[in-house]
Amino acid sequence: MEHNASLSDEKDLRVEDALLQKAVGYTWTETTREYKVVQGEDGEEERVLTKEKSVTRHVSGDLSAQMYWLSHRQGGAWQGEDQPGASGVVILPAAEAEPLPQEEGADGHDH
């Protein structure tokens, strides 16, 4: 029975880790390779790598996973319970906008 308990604990940890990754987001590198089949010096066909491309991809954190995680880890503070006197309005500080870059025309001058 102890073996089943440790297997269950291991699965729980894997699910917890997957939920955390979904909540906070994650990055991975995707590598694509292209090969060409050529005739080797010994007459045998062999695959030769002709092109390799690596792209870094990112998945942003998921709001539902964040809410689920926090509601189960932080209890009442995140379970959507109304706080006395809470209006439901969240006031965010103003963000400073960066100026847009000037487009360069076909003649090489700014427009």
Image: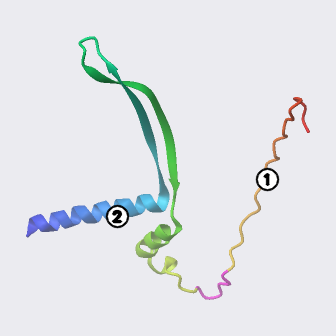
Residue type indicated by callout 1 = Ala
Q: CA distance from mark 1 to mark 2?
A: 38 Å
User: Does the magenta run of residues contain 111?
Assistant: no
Tell me the magenta residue range: 83-88
- Quadrant location of the N terminus in the rendered image: bottom left
Dot 1 or dot 2, earlier in sequence: 2
Residue type indicated by callout 2 = Glu
In front of the other: 107 or 58: 107
Residue 1 sits above or below residue 21 on the image:
below
In front of the other: 48 or 15: 48
Left or right, residue 30 beside residue 6 = right
- Residue in the picture at 57% in, 86% down: 82
Residue 21 sits above or below residue 86 on the image:
above
Query: In the image, residue 12 lies at what x, y percent?
Result: 27, 66
- Residue in the picture at 45% in, 28% down: 51
Left or right, residue 47 beside residue 57 = left
The main secondary structure of the magenta stretch is loop
Left or right, residue 67 beside residue 3 = right
Query: In the image, residue 45 lies at what x, y percent?
Result: 28, 22
Element type at marker 1? Answer: loop
Q: Which residue is mark 1?
A: 97
Within-10-Å neighbours for mark 1: few <14, some 14–19, many 20+:
few
Q: Which residue is mark 2?
A: 16
Residue 49 sits above or below residue 20 on the image:
above
